[in-house]
Amino acid sequence: MIAIVEANTIKYSKSNLITSVIYLRFKSFCFPDDVWYDFSLSVFYDWVYCLSDVMIREVDLDFWEGPYLVKIKKQNEHFFASCCDDKFERKVLHTEELDMKKFLESIYGCLNIIRNSDNVAGFQKEVDLKIEKIILMLDKNMAAIAGAV
């Protein structure tokens, strides 16, 4: 599973939120789908924050819009991602083993796509500050994952 942001869909709103097509690509499908529009920078912030606990408990990666979530769980030395189309019922649609390092690296890539987007050029300072906060947490998560496997 990797995170995807579509560069040509990135928009910076007057309310200081960045929206874009954002989704997770699994081996056989995309979740929620490959045209899902959401508050991408806010979603990444929440995901990275939640992932700081993944070594000790199951965590939920929510999308801001809609009922979708992905549950991430560590079992022994392996991570698993389970897609749910309703965060309240939590019925699992699909579960797949997760390469956590590759997933975190894909988030770094998405953050760079957002940072380098022409659509945020007029707001670069604000965007950079938000991204730097996420990267600090992401770096800690990468170090924790590397130390555990």
Image: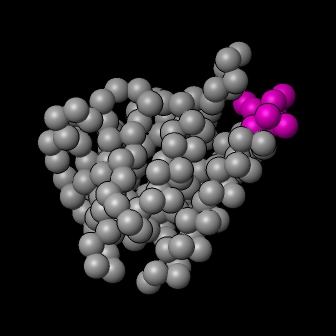
When the figure is inspected, residue 51 is found, relative to residue 91, above or below; the finding is below
Quadrant including the C terminus: bottom left
Residue 146: in sight, yes or no?
yes
Question: Is residue 88 found left or right of 145 in the rendered image?
Answer: left
Residue 140, percent across and down? 61, 66
The residue range painted magenta reads 118-127
Residue 148 at what x, y percent from top left? 46, 81
Count numbered badges in the picture: 0
Judge whether residue 6 can be spotted in this image: no
The image position of residue 60, as x and y in percent, is: 36, 47
Q: Is residue 97 left or right of residue 40?
A: left
Query: Which SS does the magenta portion mostly show?
Result: helix
Q: Quadrant of the N terminus?
A: bottom left
Q: Is 97 above or below relative to 50?
A: below
- Provide residue 57's location: percent of width, then percent of height: 34, 61
Q: Which quadrant of the structure image shows residue 65?
A: top left
Foreground pick, 85 / 71: 71
Residue at the spot 84% in from the left edge and 37% down from the top edge:
125
Q: Residue at x 84, y 28 (%)?
A: 122
Quadrant of the rendered image containing residue 68:
top left
Q: Please tell me whether residue 70 is drawn above or below residue 87 in the rendered image.
A: below
Q: Is residue 11 magenta?
A: no
Q: Which residue: 64% across, 65% down? A: 139
